[in-house]
Image: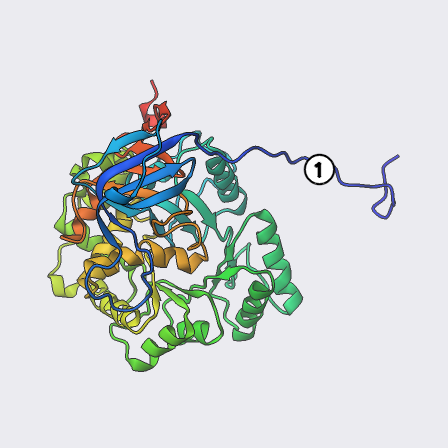
Amino acid sequence: GLAKADDAEVKGRPIGFTVKADRPSGVIALVGARVITMAGLKPGAIQGTPGVIENATVVITGNRITAIGPASSVHVPSGAKRVDVTGKTILPGIVDDHAHLGGEGDGLLAESSWQLAANLAFGVTTSHDPSNDTVTVFTNAELLRSGAKLGPRLFSTGTILYGAETPFKAIVESYDDALSHLRRQKAAGAISVKSYNQQRRDSRQMLVKAARELEMNNVPEGGSLLYMNQTHVLDGHTGVEHSLPVPRIYKDTIQLFAKSKSGYTPTLIVGYGGLSGEYYWYQKTNVWENERLLGFIPRDVIDPRSRRRVMAPDDDFNHILIARGAKQISDAGGLVQVGAHGQIQGIGAHWEMWMLQQGGMSNLEALRAATIDGARYLGLDGDIGSLEKGKLADLVILDKNPIDSIQNSEAIGMVMLNGRLYDAKTLNEIGNEQRTRKPFWWERK
């Protein structure tokens, strides 16, 4: 007959399996470029251009950097594939800490994801999605890690811990409730959770305590409420997602962020409190004519967002005021990082850098926010975010120098992820292995 629930003989049957994480073989040497390493750069105002090596050589063995420095001091092993990058600039791979990469909540996954590919083509090598379907996003993360799918390293909160009345409301009445929610998400693959509009402060505090116990990040969203944002910091959250909803901040809030070490992801592209940054770039650039962008994003996604654009005087755009506040927090030693919100995949991360520069950050400070500070926020700076011996080989090779002009960050010729080198225009692999990218659905005949 049927087994009873209390039958001691009833046991679960494991249905999981394991595959090896992708790792390339061989050695690649990138020779002759300027390298912006980000090594040693801490939050705070930057004087000059520290961490920049002219005429450098970077040696990658497998998926990690094994040597980096001036060309005169770095030995290139025999048998290495030498790539001449004279006159180019190499950056660490971009870290997008607030990347929404498409839902696919029906459980069906596309063989090739244009959202993921578009980000990689624009130099984003690590994405953190703070709201996505738990089943889908961690399945995608594993496919990416195994090499079965092409795109950035993917981390996520999974499904948000939502406090409002919805079918998926996360009820937190006790500390056990908080632990239960976080254990569920961690078991699925989450390194972080998103406490989203949990209205009771004690509920939010219990989620913070549970995150500490389980060694997870807690990246809350306050729904454009300044006082809630401030209590997020006071209560010890990892950071605050989205902008503070006021045009100006003062020393109390600046020091609160700086001294607490809670991070700030202002997502200027959708900044609260006024006309946001996304519309600025539609006004200033013909996005629908960006050929590289159109190589990875369907035109029926690009055109409706960009062709019929909002036009306004520059001083109507509130994101510039928000960016000035982010600069104040950064100068005081606070952690500010890039998050592009998935508004326009790939290029959105560059817009975030450009907007931080509009708020007063130097070009190098804006680049830091998109690389090492983004890695610090996730707790991944031991492996990514800067170009140093022993770190993972995630980097971007630019045809122009972004220290001269921040908008040169978009001039990407090649991108390397996990030691694999790709042509940024096609995402065909061009390193020690030669592979053509799988076609997207609209490219199939």
Image coordinates of residue 232 in percent, x first then y, are: 45, 71
Left or right for 301, reference 191: left
Q: Using residue 161 as the reference point, say whether residue 262 is left or right of it.
A: left
- Above or below, 225 against 117 in this view is below
* Image quadrant in which you'd find residue 152: top left
Q: Is residue 327 visible?
A: yes
Residue that lies at the very extreme toward the bottom in this rendered image = 252
State the residue in front, 308 or 253: 253
Looking at the picture, the colour scheme in use is rainbow
Total numbered badges shown on the rendered structure: 1
Mark 1: secondary structure: loop
Q: Is residue 102 visible?
A: no
Residue on which disc 1 sits: 14
Coordinates of residue 354 in the picture (x, y in percent): 21, 55
The answer to whether residue 301 is left or right of residue 433 is left
Q: Badge 1: how crowded within 10 Å, few (<14), some, or many (20+)?
A: few
* Nearer to the camera, 138 or 317: 138
Q: Amino acid at mark 1?
A: Pro
| Quadrant the C terminus occupies | top left
Please tell me which residue is depicted at 54% across the width and 43% down the height of the picture: 135
315 shown above or below 345: below
Residue in the picture at 45% in, 62% down: 219
Residue 189 point in image, percent of width and height: 55, 48
| Picture quadrant of residue 175 | bottom right
Q: Residue at x 30, y 64 (%)?
A: 272
Report the residue that reaches farthest toward the top: 445
Q: Is residue 424 above or below residue 287?
A: above
Residue 102 location, x and y as percent?
40, 43
The N terminus, quarter of image: top right
